[in-house]
Image (cartoon, coloured by chain):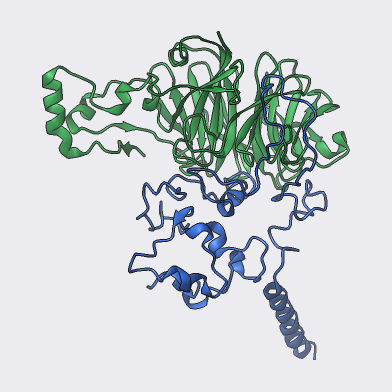
Chain colours: A green, B blue
Amino acid sequence: MRKRHPGVGFFNVWRICLIVVAGGVPFVSGCASGRITADPVYFPASGGPAHVVHLKSFNRIDDLVAIEPTFVELIRGERYTSRIESAAGVTARGENLYVCDTDQGVIHVWNLTTGNTRRLGQTGELRLATPVDVAVGADGSVYVADTGLGAVVALRANGAVPVRLRRETDASFRPVSLAISDDKLYVADLESASIVVFDTSTGGVTTTLTLSDKTGDAVMPMGVAIGPKGNLFVSDAMGGRVVVLSADDGKLIRTMSRRGNRLGDMGQPKHLDVSADGTVFVADSEFAHVHLYNGDGQLLMLIGGPDDRAGGTPMPLGVAVAEKSATLERLVPAGFEAQYFVVVTNSLGSKRINLFAVGMKR
Amino acid sequence: MTGRLLIPIGSLVAGLALVGLARGGIEGSKHDFSKKAWGKDNACGACHTPQRAETPRTKPLWDPGADLTQRFGGSVVTRGRAGSGTTTCLRCHDGTVAPSNISSAQRTEFVNQTRSARFAPAHGSSNHPVGIKYPQLDRGFRPANSVTGKGTVRLPNGKVECISCHDPHNGAGQRHFLVTSNAGSALCLTCHRK
């Protein structure tokens, strides 16, 4: 389903003709994007050396990437592109950004270089219902955690018919987060409070890590990610903490934070991701911030905030680390040396996707 | 004989079930998470975060200027954000914990009132917009003081929030956690004239 660009109506065709005749000045807001128009917001907000800068908040790819209008768009005076309605899980792979849209029941795939868009999950017999997280395998297969279907949907890169991955035929399953490593797909299952490990080649369950047995306390797993050393990071929404486990046997390595309302505590952590340097990013929907921890579990700082404005994360849900790309680096303000990027999705706010750069301001 | 007994026994069981439903309370309701695998026998903890008295001892490594006395979450309401009576619900009703998803941009609006006139159900859904100022100057709606006068429907800070019509603690024991019965559209007509 394509959307009309707000504010560019059919009767603007005369205006478009005048502009085209006048010299082809870009006429839609998307064409002017890709430039920083407001002062960048740096973090930490309290001052001191900036480690993170907010680059952009957006709902559409042409808010981020300059896209020339097609001939049809030029004639009709409308822009057609996919728009996020309700963003959930997100992941970045190569040039592509994959964003779950629980309202439209699709995965938006946005190419950050070309601006090309695709929508996965609404064709064929198996249609997505409530996609809340997405992961991409080494072969390009896309895995979607769908709470509405109670299954993980595997959209194979080779074009094969999508399949549902379930625990057992009679077991209730509520997959809320995914992480993938080689041929293993780690699924956070809220129903059983466990991490279910699937073999991506066969689609079968290889093992189930029951978290309460590992930690000695119940865990409400809302997010799962894999660190650079191969360990599993699981966010515990009920315990307000992150549990770090060995991916091999589920042995408890450490926990980070606790539930509370003070700096260093967490409210309701949702998805999380870990960068190559070991920094852990945890979206906290209650505190409306993203917590940053180092590999030892020490709090580095918070980014975002509850305000619905530049740099704010009114209700973060998804978080994904993205590698450097030419498109993203163009957004970085002068004087800031970006090492990598972080994408945060929000359940609230006028702009549902935030883009941050992590590095150092010189 | 057996058949004669079954009818009154069945009626008794059904009656007791109805009484149980009407009694309300969070225990045994869909908001009672204490028996979930992650519930920790704690019916309150899924929504309510414990308040900590002590301040942190160490500063964040990358934020030495951080205010260690600051508090997070709870009823903190800031600019451009729906009230806490909505955001607390949205933390689960975003498609993750709870099946219904009300966090769409079409359904959740904000105090800046960019689309204040939109009251129609969005996307063919019956979900009501939330986080919006109550349109008390609109002829189609009753005065705000008459809406809140009975003490059932609430308009926190003059806005329609989730808790305007729903009681997450299930105090009234109504379906869908409504604050009162909607028989004959009574709850709807508390605000809407028709």
Instruction: Give the residue drawn at x 58%, y 33%.
Output: A318
Count of numbered marks: 0
A103 left or right, relative to A218: left
Indicate the position of residue A136 as horizontal and vertical percent values: 58, 24
Above or below residue B89? Residue B26 is below
B37 left or right, relative to B100: right
Q: Can see residue A134?
A: no
Which sits in the foreground, A106 or B56? Answer: B56
Which sits in the foreground, B123 or A269? Answer: A269
Instruction: Give the residue drawn at x 54%, y 65%.
Output: B154
Which sits in the foreground, A215 or A285? Answer: A285
Which quarter of the image is occupied by the C terminus of chain B? Answer: bottom left
Indicate the position of residue A231 as horizontal and vertical percent values: 76, 21
Indicate the position of residue A27 as horizontal and vertical percent values: 23, 25
Instruction: Give the residue drawn at x 58%, y 67%.
Output: B178
Above or below residue A158? Residue B52 is below
Q: Can see residue A284?
A: yes
Which quarter of the image is occupied by the N terminus of chain B? Answer: bottom right
Above or below residue A80? Residue B186 is below
Q: Quadrant of residue B60?
A: top right
Q: Quadrant of residue A300?
A: top right
Indicate the position of residue B10 as horizontal and vertical percent values: 73, 82
